[in-house]
């Protein structure tokens, strides 16, 4: 089950869904009803599970658009039964809370809810699932406890549901094979589909290659004397005569402000620091002395890589921003143009339009990576 919620983690839900469908994926997961409806409106016919809890008033739309609804509580189960008994069939998947503490039935409540749903005309119980809280941590004792709790429920109801699933990307990388008594028919892969994992060490286990590269063009160049302050708050001053490049990207585009004074970019083959406070629409880069490389070779319109396979990596940007790589990708603003290209060597410069100040390049391909 390909997880393409949050606009496919910032990569673009519709292009990603098309690429994955071509690759043979037949199950998708989204977070919200509107995401599932959008996929249907664009012609996607695969099975779609909405992972979030439905409001009773939304259930007619689940039926209309043939979406799997998550049942995370007895109250939702009652609403589903009432709706189906009125003549509108629904397909549901029951969520068991084994330790995440977010959504889901207590394990001891699952059997009664499943019994009620299975005996209600018009209700198809399509799945039984749970979600791990610590699966990104190798050798997590708590993740193993969650798996054992889920196994106890799943073993009782393996014949009552179409699909059983628990593993996200982290669990695939850290927990190993599922117990034989569970016999899962699906795994929910999210961040790995985009060439990432929670940490670079986990990503290396599958030789994952990031699909996204964020670039921005140089919109202005200037040479400033020593002691010239740069950007809001005048938190950085030039230590000597310095060439400054202004890039057309800022926190309004999803480039995190917390990277101010920490971040760097790749330009003309050199890694150079972002200086001063990152602004809403711009940030500044110290190119060094104007008569030396790279300053002497950078021109207005040149692209700078903010993150990508050639570096800096999205993991580095996340570290500078005190967050996780998921958030960095998800926060790339809708105003940043997405351009989809074939795979290319990591060292090759991105192709961007001269009219674009910033561009997200994503490589979508049919391959194990």
Image (tube, rainbow, N blue to C red):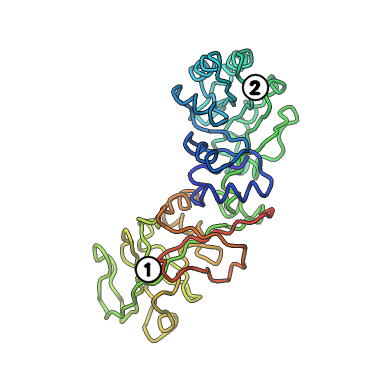
Total marks placed? 2
Q: Position of residue 297 (x, y in %)?
A: 44, 82
Mark 1 residue element: strand
Asked whether 204 or 66 is in front, the reply is 66
Which is more N-terminal, label 1 or label 2? 2
Identity of the residue drawn at 46% across and 49% down = 330
Q: Is residue 281 above or below residue 20?
A: below
Q: Callout 2 environment at 10 Å: few (<14), some (14 to 19), or many (20+)?
A: many
Q: List the residue tagged with mark 2.
A: 153
Identity of the residue drawn at 43% across and 54% down = 332
Side of 312 relative to 248 (left or right): right
Quarter of image, res 279? bottom left
Q: Is residue 168 above or below residue 316?
A: above
Q: List the residue tagged with mark 1.
A: 247
Quarter of image, res 273? bottom left
Q: Position of residue 232 (x, y in %)?
A: 25, 63
- The quarter in which the N terminus is drawn is top right
Do the CB atoms of the residues marked 2 and 1 lie less than 8 Å apart? no
CA–CA distance between discs 2 and 1? 54 Å
- Residue farthest along the bottom direction in this orientation: 291
Side of 211 relative to 57 (left or right): right
Q: Position of residue 368 (x, y in %)?
A: 69, 53
Q: Position of residue 27 (x, y in %)?
A: 63, 38
Asked whether 82 or 292 is in front, the reply is 82
- The quarter in which the C terminus is drawn is bottom right
Mark 2 residue element: helix
């Amino acid at each position: 089950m390909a997880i393409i919620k949050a606009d496919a983690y910032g990569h673009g839900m519709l292009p990603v869904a098309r690429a994955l469908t071509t690759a043979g994926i037949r199950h998708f997961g989204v977070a919200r009803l509107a995401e599932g409806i959008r996929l249907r409106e664009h012609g996607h016919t695969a099975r779609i599970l909405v992972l979030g809890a439905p409001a009773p008033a939304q259930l007619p739309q689940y039926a209309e658009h043939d979406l799997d609804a998550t049942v995370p509580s007895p109250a939702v189960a009652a609403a589903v039964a009432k709706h189906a008994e009125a003549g509108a069939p629904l397909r549901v998947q029951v969520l068991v809370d084994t330790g995440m503490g977010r959504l889901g039935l207590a394990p001891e409540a699952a059997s009664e809810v499943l019994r009620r749903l299975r005996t209600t005309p018009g209700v198809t119980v399509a799945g039984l699932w749970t979600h791990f809280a610590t699966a990104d941590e190798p050798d997590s004792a708590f993740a193993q406890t969650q798996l054992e709790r889920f196994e106890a429920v799943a073993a009782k109801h393996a014949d009552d549901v179409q699909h059983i699933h628990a593993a996200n990307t982290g669990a695939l990388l850290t927990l190993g094979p599922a117990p034989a008594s569970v016999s899962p028919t699906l795994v929910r892969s999210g961040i790995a589909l985009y060439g990432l994992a929670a940490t670079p060490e986990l990503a290396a286990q599958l030789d994952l290659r990031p699909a996204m590269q964020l670039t921005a063009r140089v919109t202005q160049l200037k040479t400033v004397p020593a002691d010239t302050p740069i950007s809001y708050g005048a938190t950085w001053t030039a230590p000597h005569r310095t060439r400054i490049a202004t890039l057309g990207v800022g926190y309004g585009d999803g480039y995190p402000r917390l990277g101010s004074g920490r971040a760097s970019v790749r330009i003309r083959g050199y890694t150079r620091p972002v200086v001063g406070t990152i602004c809403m629409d711009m940030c500044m880069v110290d190119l060094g002395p104007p008569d030396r490389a790279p300053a002497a070779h950078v021109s207005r319109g040149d692209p700078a890589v903010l993150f990508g396979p050639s570096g800096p990596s999205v993991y580095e940007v996340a570290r500078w921003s005190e967050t996780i790589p998921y958030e960095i990708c998800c926060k790339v603003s809708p105003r940043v143009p997405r351009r989809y290209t074939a795979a290319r060597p990591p060292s090759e410069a991105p192709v961007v339009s001269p009219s674009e100040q910033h561009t997200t390049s994503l490589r979508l391909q049919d391959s194990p990576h």
